[in-house]
């Protein structure tokens, strides 16, 4: 797999923590450059690698913020080979029904954020598509969820947003396959990220719903972010050269 990343550049959104950060760590010794976007003002402090560039304070739901960030990235790396969209939110406290403000913010980050990041990358793909042939192979990996496949109690807004990004992955896979772009969705199950830990820390319906979901996992444990990052790395690589338009669960056997 190492050779398949040689001289390649990848963007990771939501890369300051959780699955995104694990993906950056997974790619560290493989990629020529990794550009890491996050809404947080403070990048991880334990990185001294010359091939990692951080872009803090980027709200992925805002077109101007994302466009300016892509301009900065392309000024450093004119050719982008992969986009990983790990940027996402889920409320840690549940109310039924969820308020409009919760729905609006979850959809803005999870759905519109995927749209905004994705379409900026797609414009780049179009710009390098010459004479009807792809200039080089590219890959987009969208992070969905088990909630891309089924409903969950107390997570209506989140489930809606994760169903929506699966639709984007499938549509973009069809539209851009002939330009050399593969688009896939990774659907993690319960994964020990800061967002998941926040849900576990709160008593009440959200905690109850989360524990019930975990109890149904045949492997009887939560995933580690690094286990999701391994699948993301595979889908970015040339080893997955004939895989596109797929939703791939990484969930310990949960159905």
Image (cartoon, rainbow, N blue to C red):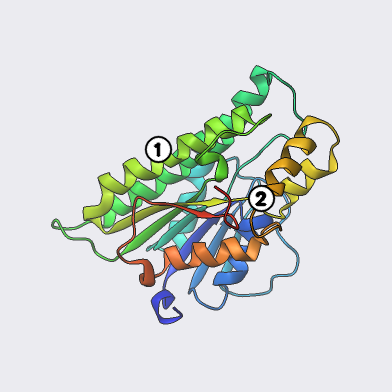
66 or 81, nearer to the observer: 81
| In the depicted structure, whether residue 92 falls above or below residue 86 | above
Q: Which mark is residue 149?
A: none
Residue furthest bottom as drawn: 3
Q: Check disc 1 and report its element: helix, strand or loop.
A: helix
Q: Residue shown at 66%/30% (left/top)?
A: 153
Q: Which residue is mark 2?
A: 190
How many residues crowd mark 2 within 10 Å: few (<14), some (14–19), many (20+)? Answer: many
Q: Check disc 2 and report its element: helix, strand or loop.
A: loop
Q: Residue shown at 65%/31% (left/top)?
A: 155
Q: Say left or right for 162 vs 132.
A: right
- In the rendering, at what x and y percent does residue 173 appear? 32, 48
Q: Say left or right for 182 vs 77.
A: left
- In the rendering, at what x and y percent does residue 105 appear? 62, 29
Q: Residue shown at 35%/43% (left/top)?
A: 170
Q: Report whether residue 220 is seen.
A: yes
- In the rendering, at what x and y percent does residue 49 appear? 63, 75
Front of the two marks 1 and 2? 2
Q: Report whether residue 16 is seen.
A: no
Q: Quadrant of residue 1?
A: bottom left
| In the depicted structure, whether residue 45 falls above or below residue 146 | below
| In the depicted structure, whether residue 40 falls above or below residue 160 | below
Q: Which residue is mark 1?
A: 167
128 or 179, nearer to the observer: 179
User: Gap in Å between the C-alphas at discs 1 and 2?
Assistant: 21 Å
Between discs 1 and 2, the one toward the N terminus: 1
Q: Residue shown at 41%/53% (left/top)?
A: 184
How many residues crowd mark 1 within 10 Å: few (<14), some (14–19), many (20+)? Answer: some
- In the rendering, at what x and y percent does residue 139 appear? 38, 59
């Amino acid at each position: 797999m190492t050779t398949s990343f040689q001289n390649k550049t990848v963007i990771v959104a939501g890369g300051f923590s959780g699955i995104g950060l694990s993906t950056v760590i997974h790619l560290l010794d493989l990629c020529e450059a990794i550009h890491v976007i996050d809404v947080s003002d403070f990048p991880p402090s334990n990185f001294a690698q010359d091939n990692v560039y951080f872009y803090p304070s980027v709200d992925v739901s805002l077109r101007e913020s994302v466009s300016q960030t892509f301009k900065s990235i392309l000024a450093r790396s004119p050719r982008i080979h992969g986009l990983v969209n790990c940027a996402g939110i889920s409320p840690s406290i549940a109310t039924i029904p969820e308020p409009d403000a919760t729905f609006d913010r979850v959809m803005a980050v999870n759905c519109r954020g995927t749209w905004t990041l994705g379409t900026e990358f797609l414009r780049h793909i179009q710009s390098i598509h010459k004479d009807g042939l792809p200039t080089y192979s590219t890959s987009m990996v969208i992070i969905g969820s088990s909630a891309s496949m089924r409903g969950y109690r107390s997570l209506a807004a989140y489930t809606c947003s994760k169903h929506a990004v699966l639709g984007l992955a499938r549509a973009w896979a069809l539209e851009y396959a002939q330009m050399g772009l593969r688009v896939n969705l990774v659907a993690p199950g319960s994964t020990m990220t800061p967002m998941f830990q926040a849900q576990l820390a709160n008593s009440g319906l959200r905690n109850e719903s989360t524990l019930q979901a975990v109890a149904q996992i045949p492997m009887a444990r939560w995933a580690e972010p690094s286990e999701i990052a391994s699948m993301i790395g595979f889908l970015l690589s040339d080893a997955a050269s004939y895989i596109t338009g797929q939703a791939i669960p990484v969930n310990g056997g949960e159905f």
